Image: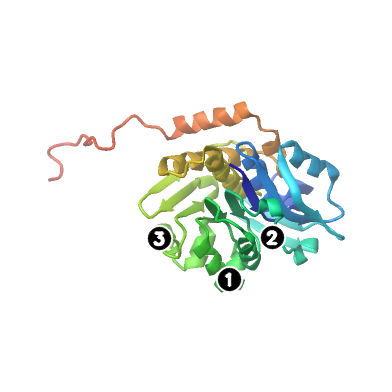
Amino acid sequence: MSILVVGSVAYDAVSTPTASLKQSLGGSATFFSLAASYFAPVSVVGVVGEDFRWEDLHMLEEHGIDTGGLVKRPGKTFRWVGEYGQDMNEAHTLDTQLNVFANFKPVLPAAARKPPFLFLANIDPDLQQAVLGQLQDRPRLVGGDTMNFWIQGKGDSLAKVIGAVGTLLINEGEIRLLTGEPNLVKAARQVLRQGPGMVVVKRGEYGAICFTKDDVFATPAYPLETVVDPTGAGDTFAGGFMGYLAATGDLSIASVRRAMIVGSVMASFTVEDFGPARLQSATAQEIQERYREFWKLTYFDGNGERPLPRRTSVGA
């Protein structure tokens, strides 16, 4: 099944404690679509400027991504400048230039108004609502993301989006800000009461946790010796997660758990280089190998129903 993603396509300038890059392809829709494209057909709706490089567009199309909804407007492409300190889990924004993205009004092509799967990437919640209003049929799954800026500035509009999506993907700091609840479990339960069937909390180097009404599942991050650039890892996770679900068409809890692992696998490639360089070069064999490594990483030979041994002289 196919996926429609609506979000940003950008150029990033990133500095880390060990290196920097003045311009790399970025944006939520870019990372999401690349990760999802390994598993399912993806269409992108977004906007770029006249400076958008042909080779970047060609790279997306080589991955089988439908860029028919990626419009070019006079002006410059959205740009973000950020840096990471020793804590690579948090980016510090130094400059944001919306450029053509400032007047972005997503218009879904006629052929894209019945997507089986839809991902509303991190954009203005008013725009997210506008996308939902253009749909002719309800998708099997609508995933959504947000950020601190929208939580603090457009809370009422965001609440409507949260009530309309099937799955909210949000990072640890954002869900605490959204709910005012420091306890992650209580925060997730609070969001579930607002409408989504699933809440996936992204935790950077600590992995991710999926909450539903009746289930909780946690996955670690893939252990890497070197992390070059975490930018886009969360969007990559979302792309792998929804890409797997779209490929299988299976929304059962067992499938969602596997999708969580796939999301973590895909994010592990993104952080190994600046921008999407490593993600776009990943092979099917490498992805499969890391999936197997996750299985070995998280499996333990035990029966959860079997009583644990204990000293009979200790405890009652």
List the residue tagged with mark 3. 189
Q: Is residue 195 above or below residue 245?
A: below
**Circle 1: is it few (<14), some (14-19), or many (20+) Cα within 10 Å?**
some
Q: Residue 304 at x, y = what percent?
A: 28, 37
Q: What is the distance, in whole Å, between disc 1 and disc 3 at their CAs?
A: 20 Å
Q: Is residue 302 visible?
A: yes
**Most foreground residue, 254 or 305:** 254
- Residue at 50% x, 61% y: name it: 175
Q: Is residue 111 above or below residue 194?
A: above
Disc 1 residue type (three-letter) = Ser
Name the N-terminal-most of marks 1 and 3: 1
Q: Residue 52 at x, y = what percent?
A: 83, 50
Mark 1–mark 3 CB contact (< 8 Å) = no
List the residue tagged with mark 2. 93
Check the picture and name the quadrant holding the C terminus: top left
Q: What is the distance, in whole Å, between disc 3 and disc 2 at their CAs?
A: 30 Å
- Residue at 61% x, 65% y: name it: 129
Q: Is residue 229 visible?
A: no
Mark 3–mark 2 CB contact (< 8 Å) = no
**What secondary structure is found at the residue carrying circle 2?**
strand
Check the picture and name the quadrant holding the N terminus: top right
Name the N-terminal-most of marks 3 and 2: 2
Name the N-terminal-most of marks 2 and 1: 2
Disc 3 residue type (three-letter) = Arg
List the residue tagged with mark 1. 157
Q: Residue 216 at x, y = what percent?
A: 39, 49
Q: Residue 34 at x, y = what percent?
A: 67, 42
**Circle 2: is it few (<14), some (14-19), or many (20+) Cα within 10 Å?**
few
